[in-house]
Image (cartoon, rainbow, N blue to C red):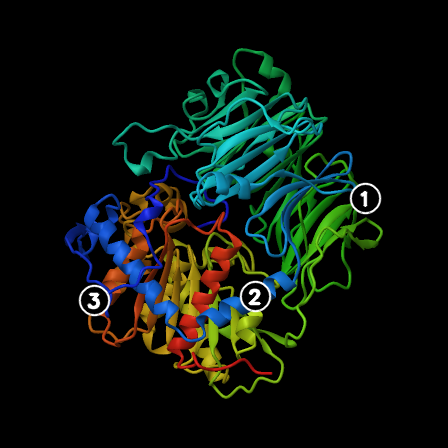
Amino acid sequence: MSIHVSRRRQLILAASLFSLGLAAEAVTPPAAPSQAVTETLHGVDVADPYRNLENLKSPETQAWLKAQGAYAAEQLAAIPVRDEIQQRIEMLAQATGDLVRGVVRMPGERYYYLKRKAGENQLKLVLRTGLGGVEKVLVDPEALTKAAGGVPHAINYFVPSWDGRYLAYGISAGGSEDASLYVMDLRSGKPVGAPVPRVHESAVHWLPDSKALTYNQIRELPAGAPDTEAYMDSTVFLLKVGDMASAARPLFGPLVNPELKLDRLDVGNVFFSPGSAYMVARTTDTTVPEGKVFIAPVASLKAKTVSWQRVSGFDDKITDVQLRGKQLFLRTYEGAPRGRVLALDLAKPVLANARTVVPEPATGVLEAFALGRDAIYTEERQGFTLRTLRHAGGKTSDMAPGLAGSTFLGGDPAHAYSDMLLTTSSWTEPATILLADGHGKVRNTGLRDSQKPAGVPELVVTEVMVPSHDGVKVPLAILHRKGLMLNGSNPTLLVGYAAYGFSIEATYDPRAYAWFERGGVLAFVNARGSGAFGDAWYRAGFKATKANTWKDGVAAARYLINQGYASNKTLGVWGTSAGGIFVGRSVTSAPDLFAAAIFDVGIMDAVRAEESANGVTNISEFGSAKNPAEFPALLEMSTYHQVKDGTAYPAVMFIHGLNDPRVDVWHSAKTAARLQAATSSGKPILLRLDGQAGHGVGSTAAQGYSKQADIYSFLLWQFGMAGNKPAN
């Protein structure tokens, strides 16, 4: 689902459920047990032949999943090039250098970031004081993994205190994202207090004096409570450093502030800024960024209750809020579908008084903003490329002129600096982390030592606008090695997402050379439902208009075939999470276009999705089957319900982690069972499962290498190219 989606109370099946290394005895995938249900929804009979597979606790379901996982593992292991491709992926990744992400720059030139050295398996949290300083490892999940008998642990988030004394961070296991909040005293390196459970969100914030913090905690549900209750009525707590969670003060939320008339799904966070006398409470439903915004003086924390003053609601279309001093800065698309930034004086906190400080771009899309000490920084999208702009003193300047693309890291939460941390963004060059000032000077920080692996081919990138079914032109980026013949015989993979207004951007992935070296083509489409051209483009692939998403995908597929990149015997398509709608409906609406498809932790049953914990939070994005006006579009976008018996479907590999808190594994299970029973092509329908993974967040390097090798080798197998060798 969305990269900012909330996490749910997770049923974590035991790792012993899957022994994926065991050989499957069956020569065909095991037939799924079926307990069919037919419901009449708004006058339409809706068949659900595998409703029983939603019960993940059922021994029958567990046994079938285990057998399916073992069967898929056996089939993938038998592909001739599979191990060779994985070795090449690992070599390419390690040759590129250390992976660094999530850099946060605090006062005193303290740099906190996640780092995985070449050859290591998990990201560690490190601290460096000054760019020339020595790195110090603060949190090492490898040690936690070892202590847990090999169950992978991951750092979900980290938030340093303003004064540098403490560090708050979240840890989860097995890809579940079910994080607990820890606090460390950085002087001693020892924990302070006990872990706080069920703090899944990164909405953790330090008070200006660094002596207390706020966090959002979901409720501990009683036995038998439906999953849909998981995110209802969450509460923001205020905790003094060293106190037990039982002593935390409820500060904000539906159960704390009935006078504010919050919705049960108003998941809140309360944040602060050093030097500001105000604090801000903001809510979303965890899926769409619009919500409610309130303010109050920090001094009111001394009172028994806090009187929150409302600034905005959902209809004000505020998608980001930041605080600096006496001003609240807000990104909105109200009256500006490509985005603009407002500033509101908190002495008179009436939204109508806000003034525009960064206007809507003339052509691009203002996707995000950040604050420095004396400037506002924005990311402006042009096609697949983002550029960071600086706005100060009535002037706007490009922070990294001459670079193909640049995005800010947002790494100055204290607004302490006049320069900005940037990272480059390009299809063909490794990312670097830069410091850019307001005078056009850019220097490499040295925090990331990436380099292009030796001997890899030169890439050609083509960005085109492809006419869709209704004549609307859709952006498509196509990557392949230089000199490739466009004769329709190249292994080609089309990738799309197109939900929540999120857009694919130019990103360098060294592991993809394992595909390019074998003549592979990668194509990325920003179909409607993405934010490629602002809010109107997003709304054109949203709820009732969602069909444009996969119709744009089909148009991109036809373009790739017509231009000679591929044929229907060498074309695959891949979608992840909410991109499951893109890939699933592309395949079920035009099965003759594709030889193979990857359904990766995808939303497959859009009709039943809202019956799950995270699914109910996505009603705002996709709609509700209980709503007669929204039901028809949901049924149309539901891959599971659009599978037709006797149809020659392409080969499909489903990928899912059993501990997925965002899209329940039964989405893949039910749809795999349905496709296996319905297809007439004889091509494989595999259900690749991982008992120690979730939605992909927290997966180890080894898990990532294995997954990518399985995808590439599965596609080459189905294209009849599994015996081909890389070109010299």
* Structural crowding at the residue carrying mark 2, measured as other residues with C-alpha within 10 Å and reported as few (<14), some (14–19) or many (≥20): many
Q: Is residue 79 visible?
A: yes
Checking the image for residue 393, the label placed there is 1
Residue at 23 percent across and 55 percent down: it is: 64
Residue nearer the viewer, 336 or 301: 301
The CA distance from mark 1 to mark 2 is: 43 Å
Q: Where the C terminus falls, by quadrant?
A: bottom right
In the image, residue 484 sits, relative to residue 21, either above or below, namely below
Q: Given the image, on which type of amino acid does mark 3 rest? A: Ala
Residue 725, image x and y in percent? 51, 81
Residue at 68 percent across and 59 percent down: it is: 431
In the image, residue 220 sits, relative to residue 399, either above or below, namely above
The CA distance from mark 3 to mark 2 is: 35 Å
| Left/right of residue 559 with respect to residue 157 in the rendered view | left
Label located before the other in sequence (3 or 1) = 1
Residue 183, image x and y in percent? 58, 28
Occupied quadrant, residue 453:
bottom right
* Structural crowding at the residue carrying mark 1, measured as other residues with C-alpha within 10 Å and reported as few (<14), some (14–19) or many (≥20): few
* Structural crowding at the residue carrying mark 3, measured as other residues with C-alpha within 10 Å and reported as few (<14), some (14–19) or many (≥20): some
Label located before the other in sequence (3 or 2) = 2
Given this view, does label 3 or label 1 mark the residue nearer the observer?
Answer: 3
The CA distance from mark 3 to mark 1 is: 65 Å
Q: Secondary structure at mark 1?
A: loop
In the image, residue 157 sits, relative to residue 548, either above or below, namely above
Q: Given the image, on which type of amino acid does mark 1 rest? A: Gly
Q: Secondary structure at mark 2?
A: helix
Q: Given the image, on which type of amino acid does mark 2 rest? A: Arg
Q: Which residue is mark 2?
A: 511
Q: Which residue is mark 3?
A: 677
